[in-house]
Amino acid sequence: MRGTKTRQTVDQVSATDLERIRALLNEVGGPNVSWGAQSLLDVWVAEAHMEAQRRASRQLLVATWALVVATLGLVVATVGLVVAG
């Protein structure tokens, strides 16, 4: 299947995110530390990565519960067939 892959893109950093990250870095480093763009990007990427992991964990949890429910359904059907037979 050629051409069926969709490209994943990264959201742009909002102004509120930048201000929040700057405030965090200033709290960590104090007034005498100057943080560069790389530091801001590192924090933002780490946050984006953690959010992606949270979404993946939620999806895995939902899929796991769906399998549990399906398995219980099969157990009930099997027991019903054994009892009826």
Image: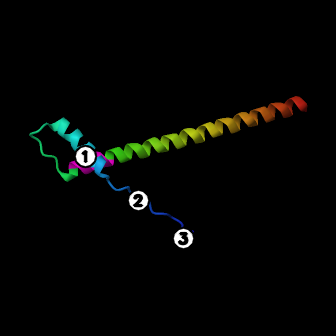
Q: Is residue 41 magenta?
A: yes
SS under mark 2: loop
Mark in front: 3 vs 2: 2
Q: Could you tell me the amino acid type at mark 1?
A: Glu
The N terminus is located in which quarter? bottom right
Secondary structure character of the magenta stretch overall? helix
Q: Which residue is mark 3?
A: 2
Instruction: Locate residue 36, reporting x and y percent.
Output: 17, 50
Mark in front: 3 vs 1: 1
Q: Which residue is mark 1?
A: 19
Instruction: Locate residue 72, reporting x and y percent.
Output: 71, 33
Q: Residue furthest bottom?
A: 2
Mark 3 / mark 1, whichever is N-terminal: 3
Total numbered labels = 3
Mark 3 / mark 2, whichever is N-terminal: 3
- Name the one closer to the observer, 25 or 61: 25
Q: Residue at x 22, y 41 (%)?
A: 23
